[in-house]
Amino acid sequence: MEDATDPLALARALIRRASVTPEDAGAIDVLIEALSKMGFACHDLTFDEGGPAIRNLYARLGDSGPNFCFAGHTDVVPPGQGWTLEPFAATVTEGRLFGRGAADMKGAIACFVAATARFLAAGPPAGSISLLITGDEEGPAVDGTVKVLDWLKNRGETLDFCIVGEPTNPTRLGEMMKIGRRGSVNAWITVTGIQGHVAYPHLADNPVPRLLEMLRRLTERPLDEGSAHFQPSNLEITTVDVGNPVVNLIPAQARATLNIRFNDLHSGASLERWIRDTCRAVDETVDIRVVVSGESFVTDPGPLSEAVADAIRAETGREADLSTTGGTSDARFISRHCPVVEFGLVTTSMHKADEHVALADLDGLTRIYGTILDRLVGHP
């Protein structure tokens, strides 16, 4: 990497590594090379508890506080179909950079590294700058950020502020930052009956009506009306199945799956209890499996969100919305350790064919990250 202050060069180098989860494909090496030359101590961390080995990186410059951390992921989803350009060629055309991960989120990583290089050109940091980069965000998120945070805790190392570079802006750079996210609960409900002929229902036990009654009770009223920082929680039934290929057979089992995205009026545990109690009131023998993939969290407006908002305003003239919308991200793990805000590029093409980012947005985001470093880290 000849010029670490150029976000485009680093973004292209990262995109050319086909790091589809769980493969690293050399993406971490690109960052280690760039950061080592800037004086960062780089820790190449591999964990494999959840399955295939996952490479992660924790890099830090400085040993005093505050420790300002940038968190992100180098893993990407598969390219899929419909591309008009090679997904890992990092093609630049018509003022845009194309490639899988351009928006989500190799572009933002490149911007932060470039911003840091420019910041360091003016002198060493008054505090510390660190990067927590995982290869397990798009996957099960078992051997990524959460493991690095445990590693840091065991070392006695703490984070004071964190920005996660997820794409957050609906259409234009500077529209939105995320100060929290709703939690997520998945539930699998299985009701068992007795298979039989539809003409002889007294010899069978149809599980379908009981399942439908459970679903009716779970969805008969809204979970809440929202809270100060969150939209209302929502429960969505994602599938109902009996696997019945014929019309004259009462099935032996009926199954449903649902997901709840919940705000800070609930917890994963409270919703699990509610699901189980509601279903068991209809049929005590029902089988229920519940997985909480993340709790809701919010970083109350304060020094971190103010610094991000000021930097956005200075660069774009826009007042960023402080949002908690969208799915889960690794910020849910970081929120247990320090204030965290998500801010990155535009969301419109992420996970799509011909994923891309405007070159002007790479430059703009680099300047925004640089202004945040000036304010929260500074020079001696």
Image: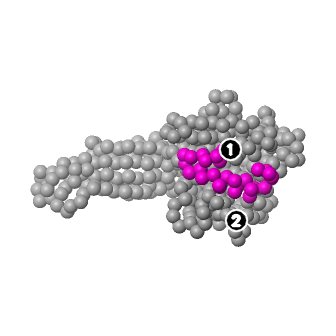
| Quadrant in which the C terminus appears | top right
Are circles 2 and 1 on residues that touch, CB within 8 Å? no
- Of residues 131 and 304, the one drawn nearer to the viewer in this rendering: 131
Q: On residue 203, which mark appears? A: none
Magenta segment boundaries in residue numbering? 1-28
The residue pinned by badge 1 equals: 29
Which residue is rendered at x = 63% and y = 32% of the image? 151
First along the sequence among labels 2 and 1: 1
Return the x and y of residue 284 as percentages of the image width and height.
28, 42
In three-dimensional space, the C-alpha distance between marks 2 and 1, rounded to whole angstroms, equals 23 Å
Amino acid marked by disc 1: Asp
Q: On residue 92, which mark appears? A: 2
Res. 110 visible in picture: yes
Amino acid marked by disc 2: Val
User: Would residue 120 be found to the left or right of residue 19 on screen?
Assistant: right
Q: Compared with residue 159, is residue 97 higher up or lower down, i.e. above or below?
A: below
- Of residues 281 and 306, the one drawn nearer to the viewer in this rendering: 306
Determine the secondary structure under disc 1. helix
User: Would residue 62 be found to the left or right of residue 292 on screen?
Assistant: right
Which residue is rendered at x = 65% and y = 47% of the image? 27
Which residue is rendered at x = 65% and y = 63% of the image? 98
